[in-house]
């Protein structure tokens, strides 16, 4: 697992041992950031269920103005901190130790990208999308919610504001793109 492009290109990132996190493949991460393109520069990025922080770190490396990492696991939080220090990207980052659902129940801040990559097979991605759907102020104008799931988990969620506008599959990784 490494940073693919930008200021921290080539830096290896620390993983979290155990089944709680599932690092994104380089192929899927490269495809995601190809889709986002130059719009990442100056963007505000929210990394929910952050795990190792690799997606938010990739955004910072490519010029995002700010990334907030929300995670509960102590080992994952240590990995995020270590990875931010190792890449020298901690100045524009904020690590929040919190339950994602509690965090999203607080006063919303508008983000350009909200990345959702929870533990698999628990329906947490749908619950997170439904909560974001009821509190649209978490998204900036033209903001996106991106859910990373295993393709076998996908079933269209019941949403009223968020709309699926793209869906891509890279092996065992599916990326679902939503906007208001």
Image (cartoon, helix red, strand yellow):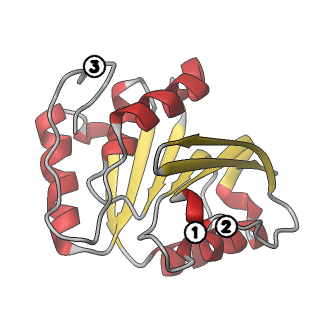
The relative height of residue 100 versus residue 137 in the rendered view (above or below) is below
The relative height of residue 115 versus residue 25 in the rendered view (above or below) is below
Identify the disc placed on residue 7: 3
Q: In which quarter of the image is residue 161?
A: bottom right
Q: Which residue sits at x=68%, y=74%?
A: 131
Q: Name the residue under label 2.
A: 129
- Looking at the rendered structure, the secondary structure element under dot 1 is helix
Q: Where is residue 38 in the image (x, y as percent from the top left)?
A: 56, 18
Q: Are marks 1 and 2 in contact (CB under 8 Å)?
A: yes
Q: How crowded is mark 1: few (under 14 residues within 10 Å), some or many (20 or more)?
A: many
For marks 1 and 3, the one nearer the N-term is: 3
For marks 2 and 3, the one nearer the N-term is: 3
**Marks 1 and 3: which is nearer the front?**
1
Alpha carbon distance from label 1 to label 2:
6 Å
Q: Mark 1 points at which residue?
A: 125
Q: Left or right of 64: which side holds 36?
A: right
- Looking at the rendered structure, the secondary structure element under dot 2 is helix
- Looking at the rendered structure, the secondary structure element under dot 3 is loop
**Marks 2 and 3: which is nearer the front?**
2
Q: Left or right of 58: which side holds 104?
A: right
Q: Residues within 10 Å of mark 2 (few under 14, many from 20)?
A: many
Q: How crowded is mark 3: few (under 14 residues within 10 Å), some or many (20 or more)?
A: some
Q: Left or right of 76: which side holds 140?
A: right
Identify the disc placed on residue 79: none
The one nearer the camera, 104 or 166, is 166
Q: Position of residue 39 (x, y in %)?
A: 60, 24
Alpha carbon distance from label 1 to label 3:
30 Å
Q: Which residue sits at x=14%, y=34%?
A: 12
Alpha carbon distance from label 2 to label 3:
31 Å
Q: Which residue sits at x=20%, y=43%?
A: 84
């Amino acid at each position: 697992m490494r940073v693919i492009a930008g200021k921290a290109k080539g830096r290896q990132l620390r993983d979290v041992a155990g089944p709680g996190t599932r690092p994104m493949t380089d192929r899927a991460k490269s495809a995601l950031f190809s889709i986002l393109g130059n719009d990442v520069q100056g963007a505000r990025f929210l990394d929910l269920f952050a795990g190792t922080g690799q997606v938010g770190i990739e955004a910072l490396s490519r010029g995002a103005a700010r990334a907030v990492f929300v995670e509960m696991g102590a080992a994952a939080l240590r990995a995020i901190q270590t990875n931010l220090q190792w890449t020298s990207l901690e100045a524009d980052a904020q690590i929040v130790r919190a339950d994602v659902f509690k965090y999203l129940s607080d006063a919303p801040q508008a983000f350009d990208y909200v990345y959702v990559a929870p533990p698999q097979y628990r329906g947490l991605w749908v619950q997170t999308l439904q909560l974001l759907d009821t509190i649209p102020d978490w998204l900036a104008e033209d903001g996106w919610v991106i859910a990373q799931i295993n393709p076998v988990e996908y079933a269209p969620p019941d949403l009223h504001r968020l709309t699926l506008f793209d869906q891509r599959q890279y092996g065992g990784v599916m990326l679902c793109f939503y906007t208001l």
